[in-house]
Image (tube, helix red, strand yellow):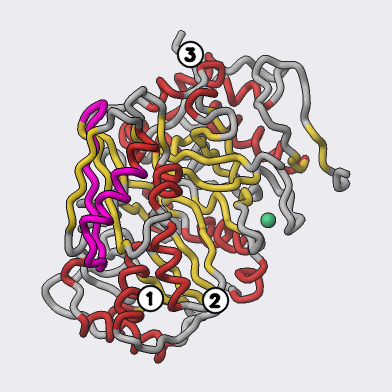
Amino acid sequence: MLSSGKSRKKNDSPFQLPYSRVFSTEYENNSLKSLEIALNEATAYQAWKTLDPGKEHSIDERYLALPTLTKKDIREHFPQGFLPHGRDASSGLASGEIEFVKTSGTTGDSVTNIWNQRWWDASEKASWKLNSYASKAASGNHPEAILANPLNVGFVSDDVDLPMEKRRLSRFLYLNEKSNPLSWTPQHMDRMIKELEIYKPVTLEANPSLLAKLCRYIAMSKKKVFQPKLILFTYEYPTRFHIQQISHVFNIPLTSSYGTTEVGYIFMQCEKGKLHQNSEYCRVDLQPLKPEHGGPSIGRILVTTFNNSWYTILRFDVADLAHLDEEGTCACGRDSGLILSAIEGRTASVTLTCKGRLVTLRELDDAISVLDGIDEYQLRQVSRNEYQLQLASQRTDKKTLKGETKEILSKLYGEEAKISVAFKEALAPSASGKYVISQAIFPIDIEDYLDHRFLHKEN
Ligand SMILES: [Zn+2]
């Protein structure tokens, strides 16, 4: 049954995506509006105009005929190329409606974006509706603690400890000012525990690797910690080990909030565990992987924002892979747009089996998560058949653990895989402040693995 005002799109177009979607008329209208503003007003998209097949084609066909927007494009056309008619960056900056915000980025160099706080807040607020715990707990004025790398958000101070009042900003408390988590001392983590008790945040937004580190300390030292109403994961991929370690300490709902600085809040995990599209604020197009690499359910996602009158973003490649839910429905009843069973991880995190099949971070994580007693791991593929795994583990039977690990990885990557396992006390994040859990150190062009029927072809 379809709810009123919604239409199910099905046609015989060669552009037909391998799933059916339910979208509101408003979504279709917003998709059209964003497309027209980009092509007719924002000069960054000028070269795309000739590729648009035109109004007699469906909105999906028109989007699919267009290329993707990359960080490089943003750098080249920033800022004026992304402003619609009548908007001028200097007047927006002068009135305080916008700011320029630089991202640390995990793919390519960092990018400066136009930051429209009002739009961002509205996008965030809409995302809360997609999780019943968030919609109950979050008012928009609620106190929130953030445990992140300050290179991504907050205040950096590596040499001097900042007192609590110097880490406050509106309703937020930033628990950490150190850019390298390896420098965290027990005193630093005790301070976080104490401040959670003092501040009593309703929500805790956390970089999962950092919260997992704090939770390992809390569990080991048998301390008690204040329990907010909800933990939201953001900034990086939460591994199963992270989730286990955090659930051991926090007996509250955990959810993944997925978005980026460029495009706001894209998906939110509901209380039943699936991820729902924030379709009031963005359009998502999925470019499926080839069937032999996990398509059509797994694909690269391209995001178009709606109604951000200061920043026109069309088909932005967020450099992540998502897994469409095969049932296409959720027990929570929401049908606002695409439903994902999971985020599969960064495109920069993919590795290849010895036979050349693409392995997403999630597939690796699912495989490796059966191990016991692991704090953290990092896998580097150094050649077609060589894999180096670093493990941080408190287990004393390292030889057994090594054997178990090699068995899992050779099952995943192939019999001929040459696997080395090295033990580390702890693992460090990358220069961007985020952990790289897996990567191939040789170039992999993700487009070689995407189904070419859904890729823009250069004329
Ligand atoms: Zn749901």
Would residue 105 appear left or right of 366 to someone viewing this image? left
Q: Earlier in the sequence, mark 3 or mark 2?
A: 2
Q: Is residue 171 something that shows in the picture?
A: no
Give, as a three-letter code, the residue at label 2.
Ile
Q: Residue visible at 42% across and 29% down?
A: 44
Pick the front one: 374 or 258: 374
Q: Secondary structure at mark 3?
A: loop
Residue 161 is marked as none
- Residue 331: x and y in percent read 74, 56
- Residue underneath mark 3: 457
| Quadrant including the N terminus | top right
Density class for disc 1 (Cα within 10 Å; few <14, some 14-19, many ≥20) is few
Q: Residue visible at 49% across and 20% down?
A: 48
- Residue 138: x and y in percent read 59, 73
- Residue 118: x and y in percent read 52, 60
Q: Earlier in the sequence, mark 1 or mark 3?
A: 1
Would residue 319 appear left or right of 405 to someone viewing this image? right
Residue 252 is marked as 2
Density class for disc 3 (Cα within 10 Å; few <14, some 14-19, many ≥20) is few
Q: Earlier in the sequence, mark 2 or mark 1?
A: 1
Q: Which residues are magenta?
A: 383-408
Please identify the quarter of the rendering in which residue 349 is found.
top left
Ligand 1 closer than 8 Å to label 2 CB:
no
Give, as a three-letter code, the residue at label 3.
Lys
Q: Residue visible at 29% across and 85% down?
A: 221
Mark 2 or mark 1: which is in front? Answer: 2
Circles 1 and 3, Cβ within 8 Å, touching? The answer is no
Residue 117 drawn above or below residue 287: below
- Residue underneath mark 1: 169
